[in-house]
Each structure stands twice: as structure tokens, then as C-alpha cells.
Image: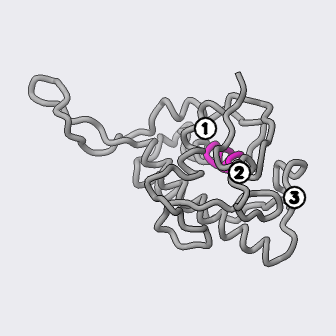
């Protein structure tokens, strides 16, 4: 079974920095990302979240375009987020609010760009051509990481269904789950392409 590729590879008009696409995203977070022409259509962040669990099972991935490079980066960032939230001895899983804070901080932390010594996929990514391009890419990735962190928290901690007196769901949603979804956290040790963004 082949890995899933980004549908945004088909768009030849997309701006690139190095050889990574700078795609529109649906967000209220300030930054340089282009505004999506149709906010009802899924963006690259939604696509990365949807394809994360399927694609992280693959150690090999044939890159078909610049949008695939952005999707690979975002999938590796999702893995980093799950690792950050995983419980350890003496530290239980965080609540939704704590997880939101932790991932928001992680999203804006200093990170390596293509061409930097700490970037894990330098053989597959071209570095930005200039300092201005590097700054633009860092701003764009910070914005996409921040938006992805918010959406990932919403998926990790879905609202729970309220139950009626008869024990059946009422169709109304209650408070958010107190622990992250085990269906997501079970992928925390999976390494897409055998790589991770963290050291």
C-alpha cells in the first residue's frame, strides 16, 4: 500500500521557499501565510492531521512535490507534539488547558530550518536562498505550527457525549475529555520516515 500524498502538489502557482510550499491556511493566528480562498475547504494542516496516522506507518516516502515537503514537516511536528504530551513516571497526561499551553509554547520555540545543522531532512530540502527567505519561512512555519497545535489539541481532547438518565447518549456534547485520546497517543512512538524534529 503506498503512502498518501498531498493534494496540494497539483497547484503549480504556489510560492516556494527553498523547495517547500508556502500554502494558504485557515487561521486567526497572525502571520505571513496566504489566506485560503475557500475557508470551507480543508487546508494543508487539516490534510496533515487526517493523514498522520496512516502515513506515520511508512519508513519510506516518495516526495511528489513541494506540498509533500510541507506535509512531511507538519507530520513530524505532530509526532513531536504527541511525545511532548506523553505521560511519564511521576507526570500524568496533561489536561486540555495544560496541553494547549505546552503545545503553544512548543510551536513558537526555536527550531531548525532546512540547511541548519539540526534539521533532520537536509538531504531532501533545499535551504532558503537568502536571509529574508529564511526569516519568511521561519515566520510561516511558526504560524502553521501554532495553528496545528490548536487543532491537534481539539482532536486529542474531543468533547464527551452527555448521557441521559437511561445511560444512552442525548446527542449533546459535554466537557472535553480529561486525557488525550488513546487512538492518537498510541502513535507517539511511531517515527514517520524514521525521523523526528526533536534532537
Q: Nearer the viewer, residue 48 or 42?
A: 42
Please tell me how crowded label 1 is: few (under 14), some (14-19), or many (20+) other residues with Cα within 10 Å: many
Please tell me how crowded label 2 is: few (under 14), some (14-19), or many (20+) other residues with Cα within 10 Å: many
Q: Earlier in the sequence, mark 1 or mark 3?
A: 1
Question: x, y (%) of residue 10?
Answer: 69, 48
Q: Is residue 54 magenta?
A: no
Question: x, y (%) of residue 101?
Answer: 48, 59
Q: Nearer the viewer, residue 121 or 87?
A: 121
Secondary structure category for the residue under label 3: loop
**Residue 11 falls in which quadrant of the image?**
bottom right
The N terminus sits in image quarter: top right
Residue at image mark 3 = 126
Residue at image mark 2 = 67
Please tell me how crowded label 3 is: few (under 14), some (14-19), or many (20+) other residues with Cα within 10 Å: some
Left or right of residue 157, residue 140 in this image? right
In this view, 52 is above or below 35: above
In this view, 187 is above or below 119: above
In this view, 62 is above or below 111: above
Q: CA distance from mark 1 to mark 3?
A: 23 Å
Secondary structure category for the residue under label 1: helix
Q: CA distance from mark 3 to mark 2?
A: 14 Å
| Residue at x 51%, y 63% (from the top left corner) | 37
The region drawn magenta spans 70-79
Q: Is most of the magenta stretch helix, strand or loop?
A: helix
Residue at image mark 1 = 52
Task: Identify the disc placed on residue 192.
Answer: none
Question: x, y (%) of residue 105?
Answer: 56, 62
| Residue at x 41%, y 47% (from the top left corner) | 95
Q: Earlier in the sequence, mark 3 or mark 2?
A: 2
Q: Earlier in the sequence, mark 1 or mark 2?
A: 1
Amino acid at each position: 500500500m503506498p503512502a498518501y500524498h498531498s493534494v496540494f502538489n497539483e497547484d503549480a502557482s504556489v510560492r516556494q521557499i527553498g523547495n517547500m510550499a508556502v500554502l494558504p491556511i485557515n487561521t486567526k493566528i497572525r502571520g505571513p501565510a496566504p489566506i485560503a480562498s475557500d475557508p470551507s475547504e480543508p487546508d494543508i494542516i487539516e490534510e496533515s492531521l487526517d493523514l498522520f496516522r496512516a502515513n506515520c506507518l511508512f519508513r519510506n516516502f516518495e516526495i511528489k512535490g513541494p506540498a509533500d515537503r510541507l506535509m512531511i514537516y507538519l507530520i513530524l511536528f505532530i509526532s513531536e507534539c504527541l511525545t511532548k504530551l506523553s505521560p511519564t513516571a511521576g507526570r500524568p497526561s496533561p489536561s486540555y488547558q495544560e496541553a494547549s499551553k505546552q503545545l503553544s509554547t512548543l510551536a513558537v520555540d526555536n527550531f531548525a530550518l532546512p540547511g541548519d545543522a539540526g534539521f533532520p531532512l537536509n538531504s531532501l530540502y533545499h535551504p532558503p536562498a537568502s536571509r529574508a527567505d529564511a526569516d519568511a519561512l521561519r515566520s510561516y512555519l511558526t504560524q502553521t505550527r501554532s495553528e496545528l497545535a490548536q487543532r491537534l489539541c481539539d482532536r486529542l481532547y474531543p468533547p464527551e457525549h452527555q448521557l441521559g438518565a437511561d445511560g444512552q447518549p442525548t446527542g449533546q456534547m459535554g466537557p472535553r475529555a480529561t486525557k488525550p485520546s488513546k487512538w492518537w497517543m498510541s502513535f507517539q512512538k511511531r517515527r514517520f520516515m524514521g525521523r523526528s524534529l526533536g534532537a
